Amino acid sequence: MLRNGVGGLKVAIQGELGSNSHMATVEMLGNQNDLEIVACTVSAQVLAKVVVGEVDAAALPIENSLHGSVAEHYDLLLELPVRIERESLLRIRHNVIAMPGVKLEEVRRVMSHPVALSQCRRYLAAHPELEVIPFYDTAGSVKHLMQAGLRDTAGIAPELAARVYGAKVLVAGVEDHTENYTRFHLLRKECGSGDVGVGANPGDANKMSLAFAVEHRPGTLVAALERLANAGVNLTKIESRPVPGSPWEYVFYVDIRFDSSAMVETALIALRGHCRMVKVLGRYRAA
């Protein structure tokens, strides 16, 4: 279900306007006039809005090149009836942002999302005089300090957050590594095969994400991976997550690249003949 022409396209994100998720959404869908970003506090709320139809889609980060995978989002992908429609890679640049007129030497504390803080360890270690405060969102930290008038506090956030809330960048590019990227997924509700996607072209797909579980016996995971290899697909990522209520058992999440739909269908048939559970999380064009 799309709202184009009937109120525009609504996309939910975790975080506030001006966040990296906001920028990733614009990158995937374009900065169109009828694009409405719906800010949410937590990721479960984001996908709940997709499932009940309050929004057309959601944009969530799945993996960062420095911090690693977002485990919660893998769990939500398996649990909920949503489908990955596309992905994007966003270059992440963190900035120290404060109220206009505030000088760097006036700042006594910095706040941001814990993941962002973990990506700026070198800068923070070089400034032990700064009190570090975890916050629910990068852009949210800038929104908060502007609304509260905190002249002794800075946020660590994208430059877009400074523009959205009228703040000022004091120090640009404080992330530990310049090669800092986050992979985002655009997600929509999983409906019938005839459902129209959010601007996606299924025939253009060359990547698939899926989850599977195998019997808890020696060699079952190796056998599953061998079936993928024999089908000719290229395994580009594997992630494991624990099965709730079954200690030391895991669901495996994999990304594969393929050259043809026939190749990926062969892989799925082989997996389904071996695994006790297989769920396709989405087929889409690799970023």
Image (spheres, helix red, strand yellow):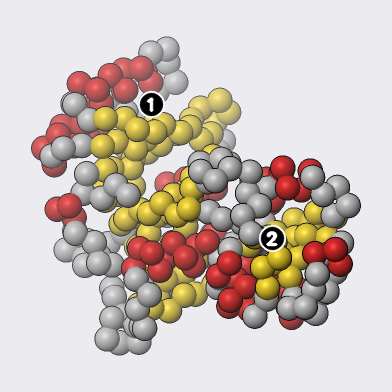
| Residue appearing at x 38%, y 26% in the figure | 214
Given residues 206 and 178, the one toward you in this image is 178
Count all numbered tags in the image, as a single digit.
Answer: 2
Q: Is residue 176 left or right of residue 269?
A: right
| Residue appearing at x 40%, y 36% in the figure | 253
Residue for badge 1: 214
**On the image, which quarter does residue 71 sit in?**
top right
Given residues 33 and 255, the one toward you in this image is 33
Q: Residues within 10 Å of mark 2 (few under 14, many from 20)?
A: few
| Residue appearing at x 79%, y 45% in the figure | 126
Residue 168 picture location, percent across and down: 68, 73
Q: Is residue 147 left or right of residue 28?
A: right
Work out whether residue 98 can be spotted: yes
Q: Amino acid at mark 2?
A: Val
SS for dot 2: strand
Residue for badge 2: 171
Residue 125 picture location, percent across and down: 79, 43
**Position above or below: 8 against 168:** below
Q: Amino acid at mark 1?
A: Val
Q: Residues within 10 Å of mark 1 (few under 14, many from 20)?
A: many
Q: Is residue 75 left or right of residue 127?
A: left
Q: Residue furthest top?
A: 218
Residue 13 picture location, percent across and down: 50, 66
Residue 261 picture location, percent across and down: 13, 42
Query: N-terminal of the two: label 2 or label 1?
Result: 2
Work out whether residue 50 can be spotted: no
Between circles 2 and 1, the one closer to the viewer is 2
**Position above or below: 210 against 160:** above
Real-space Cα separation, disc 2 to disc 1, in angstroms: 49 Å
In the rendered structure, are the residues bearing label 2 and label 1 in contact, judged by CB atoms less than 8 Å apart?
A: no
| Residue appearing at x 17%, y 52% in the figure | 204
